[in-house]
Image: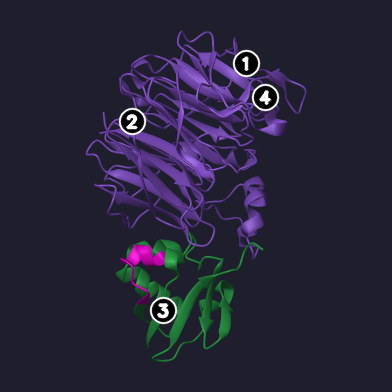
Chain colours: A green, B purple
């Protein structure tokens, strides 16, 4: 599956200012691994030492929120667009 | 006489540059990233460590302070490494899903970066030491330190279990020191294979909450130490310590012990002077009665207050990594407050001026002479 992922502003600085990046994968987890292989600096921000998706990452897919614990196996379709954001904190 | 000061804040890096240490220009880079440490290597490359509760730890580099790129590698523990339960308890406030309670060991902050003997050393929390011998392209854990028996019983300071101080001996690459809040001060004499605690006679509540230690790497065994419970000096590489508080403000601490409290300790190599910023004990953590002052000892025995140009109404703190010297002659000193104000002195602390204000909370300061 070829999908597109919108990066949050902090991670755009890692990718030279790019807002959208392309990836392939049948799940969010696979897509993030694909991006990490092709862009290793991004991988530091997606996965922790135990290769788990960082716990505060949140994905928006067709208006639905997908938390880190669900993202690894969340299935994608060709052409999907995801928004990567993070858990809300603060007041 | 040009100087660059890297000011790490809660929301980015303020890069202050000056040709004469009087007029300053500021760029604000890496916006949005908490900047916790920086260093510069022998080839003039500057490294900045960032962390984020959401996006983890990373290191950016620049050769001109304008163009920054993130390195593909950063210090990381192995998947099988076991974490410290008390550190987990402290950082769990940001652990929305309770994952840290699973027992892993994670690098959640780089507290200090240190260049010596052709390598870059990183001190991190959960407390550990890493080294890179290829300009940050890869990092290796220093297992002799990180895997010491008993680390599961180390007790963290309020900011977590952080390895925040790294010192090296310019004449002996096998000797170095590290400080951890609140697991104490350690020395190796065999290149990091084995380590020994060096907290003899330092007031303790069980653990040793070392705040910062400074020295001249060319005269490495003379150490100046700001502990949670007082200021100390060692003349033998930390084997023994004595109280060094003549002239410093002393106050009653939360446990009733009377001593001088603060965080940074900076040494100027050319003059031999050492600098501290006392705060009014661990209950208040701001300058006594609001008078911000830097204290200096030139002879290594007696401290004197230097406050010309510093405000009389400052109720902010100065964190352990938020003061640095440029090592020029005369030495320039730079420090920042938790209220986001930067001060500079071009004359070994005799006079001070505000060089930036309105910044986010200042976490780290380093100064580099061009």
Percent x, y of residue A91: 67, 63
Q: Is residue A32 magenta?
A: no
The residue nearer to you, when weighing B71 against B352, is B352
The quadrant holding residue B152 is top right
Residue at mark 1: B201
Tag in front: 4 or 2: 2
Magenta-drawn stretch contains A14: yes
Q: Which residues are magenta?
A: A11-20
**Residue drawn at (28%, 51%) of the image:** B66
Q: Which residue is disc 4 drawn over?
A: B204
The location of residue B187, given as percent across then percent down, is 47, 25
Nearer the camera: disc 2 or disc 3: 2
**Which structural element holds mark 4?**
loop
Chain under numbered label 2: B
Same subunit, tags 4 and 1: yes
Spot the residue most to the bottom: A78
Which residue lies at the image location 45% right of the left edge and 45% below the top edge? B8
Circle 1: element type: loop
């Amino acid at each position: 599956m070829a999908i597109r992922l919108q990066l949050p502003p902090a991670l755009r600085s890692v990718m030279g200012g790019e807002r959208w990046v392309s990836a392939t994968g049948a799940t969010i987890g696979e897509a993030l691994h694909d991006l990490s292989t092709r862009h290793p600096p991004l991988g530091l921000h997606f996965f922790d030492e135990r290769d788990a998706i960082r716990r505060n990452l949140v994905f928006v897919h067709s208006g639905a929120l997908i938390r880190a614990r669900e993202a690894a196996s969340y299935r994608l379709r060709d052409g999907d667009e995801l928004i990567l954001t993070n858990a809300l904190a603060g007041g | 006489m040009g100087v660059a000061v890297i000011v790490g804040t809660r929301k980015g890096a303020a890069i202050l540059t000056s040709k004469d240490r009087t007029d300053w220009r500021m760029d604000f880079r890496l916006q949005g990233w908490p900047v916790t440490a920086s260093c510069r290597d022998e080839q003039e490359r500057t490294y900045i460590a960032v962390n984020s509760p959401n996006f983890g730890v990373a290191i950016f580099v620049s050769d001109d302070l304008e163009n920054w790129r993130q390195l593909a590698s950063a210090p990381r523990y192995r998947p099988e490494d076991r974490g410290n339960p008390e550190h987990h308890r402290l950082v769990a406030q940001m652990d929305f899903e309770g994952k840290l309670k699973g027992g892993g060991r994670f690098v959640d902050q780089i507290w200090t970066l240190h260049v010596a003997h052709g390598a870059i050393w990183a001190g991190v929390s959960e407390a550990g030491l890493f080294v890179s011998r290829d300009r940050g392209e890869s990092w290796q854990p220093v297992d002799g330190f990180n895997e010491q028996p008993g680390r599961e019983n180390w007790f963290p300071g309020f900011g977590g279990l952080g390895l925040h101080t790294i010192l090296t001996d310019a004449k002996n690459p096998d000797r170095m020191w590290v400080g951890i809040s609140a697991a104490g001060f350690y020395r190796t004499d065999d290149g990091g294979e084995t380590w020994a605690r060096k907290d003899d006679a330092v007031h303790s509540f069980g653990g040793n909450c070392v705040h910062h230690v400074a020295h001249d790497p060319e005269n490495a065994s003379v150490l100046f130490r700001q502990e949670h419970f007082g200021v100390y000096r060692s003349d033998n590489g930390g084997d023994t310590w004595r109280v060094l508080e003549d002239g410093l403000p002393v106050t009653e601490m939360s446990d009733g012990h009377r001593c001088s409290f603060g965080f940074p300790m900076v040494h100027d190599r050319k003059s031999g002077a050492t600098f501290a910023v006392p705060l009014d004990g661990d209950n208040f953590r701001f300058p006594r009665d609001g008078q911000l002052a830097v204290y200096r000892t030139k002879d290594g025995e007696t401290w004197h207050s230097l406050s010309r140009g510093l405000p009389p109404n400052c109720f902010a703190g100065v964190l352990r990594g938020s003061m640095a010297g440029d090592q020029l002659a005369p030495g320039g000193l730079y420090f920042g407050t938790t209220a986001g104000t930067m001060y500079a002195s071009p004359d070994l602390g005799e006079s001070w001026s505000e060089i930036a204000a309105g910044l986010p909370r200042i976490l780290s300061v380093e100064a580099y002479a061009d």
